[in-house]
């Protein structure tokens, strides 16, 4: 007998193997609960996203398992609720159903009306806070019926689990049914406060940097190898202050006790920081914009996607450190 992974602790629901599918018992709304548990791998996480309690999630998923006559999740202490083979197959169908319903609702509800709906954008931390946040705020002003979630985090967001609808990443997206494009190049340079430079040995060439200390990433916790540029840019650099956060490194540099390699879009507008050996220490990286193929057709996704590309194109010089000020895209109100 199979036991539901989401059964209540002392009263699990038992299902006979080979139980026939009973369409009359299927409640389509239960599929929403299944989808959230599959994405979060936690019943508590699904409950929070759905605005219900844990027992409601457990009951609805058990009901779905009963109707389908199969186990959809295995419980793992380390991995949470893991999809069974049957659950994985069902996820593909339910995920496609959700997108189809969203697309249909959007086409019907938005006919002749302003764009509306919800868009979640995931991004690297520094770019999200210093570039995307002000731009998306302006976009939302022009499209008040579109709600925006911005996730500027020092790790990857998963498009497959719908942690975000659109992602800005340092690398091309994982294999799968995704649409992606190169969003922009950007540069990083070495920065310090004037107070630091006045109080420490002069820096006239790269060799002089051996006498200085740096704020940098924690090598084994960096979420992308693209972040491990310090050793390549400054061979032999000594870092005794490290963080997983680019913003933390920025604030460490502002304290005047260390040098830091920072994105120009973050450090250049700040008059408290000055570039060090700006023609010698230059790191160029790229951002990629990606989205699930099925979501890309949604009008609200297209609107945000096109806006971010326009904002990046307008600000190419700023992102490369060749212009001092950020530029703003004119957004036509909806």
Image (spheres, rainbow, N blue to C red):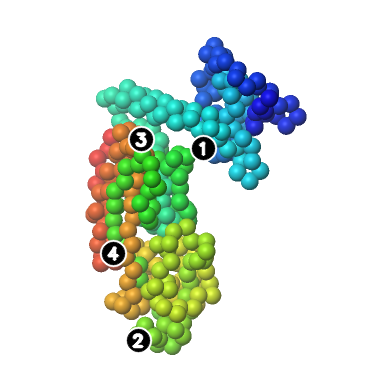
For numbered disc 3, what is the local secondary structure?
loop
Query: Where does label 1 land, which residue?
Result: 39
For numbered disc 2, what is the local secondary structure?
loop
- Provide residue 277's location: percent of width, then percent of height: 33, 79
| Residue for point 38% across, 33% down | 117
Looking at the picture, does residue 121 appear above or below residue 323? above
* CA neighbours of label 4 inside 10 A, class few (<14), some (14 to 19), many (20+): many
Query: Where does label 4 land, which residue?
Result: 320
Image quadrant containing the C terminus? top left
| Residue for point 31% across, 46% down | 180
| Residue for point 29% across, 56% down | 184
- Provide residue 55's location: percent of width, then percent of height: 66, 29
| Residue for point 52% across, 13% down | 23
Q: Give the Cα separation between the discs numbered 2 and 4.
A: 23 Å
Marks 4,3: beta carbons within 8 A: no
The residue lying toward the viewer, choosing from 169 and 328, is 169
Q: Give the Cα separation between the discs numbered 3 and 2.
A: 52 Å
Q: Give the Cα separation between the discs numbered 1 and 4.
A: 37 Å
Query: Where does label 3 land, which residue?
Result: 295
Q: Give the Cα separation between the discs numbered 2 and 1.
A: 53 Å
Q: Can you tell which of label 4 and label 3 is closer to the viewer?
A: 3
Whichever of callouts 1 and 3 sits on the residue coming sooner in the sequence is: 1
Whichever of callouts 2 and 4 sits on the residue coming sooner in the sequence is: 2
Looking at the picture, does residue 169 appear above or below residue 303? below
Query: Where does label 2 land, which residue?
Result: 204
């Amino acid at each position: 007998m199979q036991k539901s992974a989401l059964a209540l602790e002392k009263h699990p629901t038992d299902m006979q193997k080979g139980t026939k599918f009973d369409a009359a018992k299927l409640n389509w709304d239960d599929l929403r609960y299944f989808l959230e548990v599959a994405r979060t791998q936690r019943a508590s996480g699904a409950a929070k996203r759905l605005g219900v309690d844990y027992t409601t999630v457990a009951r609805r998923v058990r009901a779905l398992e009963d109707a389908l006559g199969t186990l959809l999740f295995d419980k793992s202490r380390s991995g949470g609720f893991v999809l069974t083979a049957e659950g994985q197959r069902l996820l593909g169908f339910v995920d496609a159903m959700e997108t189809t319903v969203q697309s249909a609702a959007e086409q019907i509800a938005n006919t002749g009306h302003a764009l509306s709906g919800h868009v979640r954008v995931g991004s690297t931390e520094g770019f999200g806070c210093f570039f995307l946040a002000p731009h998306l705020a302006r976009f939302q002003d022009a499209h008040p019926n579109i709600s925006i979630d911005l996730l500027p985090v020092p790790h990857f967001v998963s498009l497959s689990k719908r942690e975000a609808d659109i992602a800005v990443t340092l690398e091309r997206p994982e294999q799968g049914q995704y649409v992606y494009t190169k969003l922009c190049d950007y540069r990083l340079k070495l920065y310090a406060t004037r107070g630091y430079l006045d109080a420490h040995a002069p820096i006239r060439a790269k060799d002089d940097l051996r006498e200085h200390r740096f704020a940098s990433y924690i090598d084994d916790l960096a979420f992308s190898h693209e972040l491990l540029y310090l050793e390549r840019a400054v061979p032999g650099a000594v870092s005794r202050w490290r963080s997983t956060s680019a913003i933390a490194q920025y604030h460490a540099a502002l304290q005047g006790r260390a040098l830091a390699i920072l994105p120009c879009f973050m450090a250049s507008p700040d008059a408290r920081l000055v570039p060090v050996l700006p023609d010698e220490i230059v790191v160029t990286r790229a951002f990629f914009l990606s989205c699930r193929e099925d979501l890309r057709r949604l009008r609200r996704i297209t609107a945000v996607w096109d806006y971010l590309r326009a904002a990046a194109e307008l600000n190419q010089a700023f992102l490369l450190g060749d212009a001092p000020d950020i530029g703003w895209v004119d957004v036509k109100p909806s």
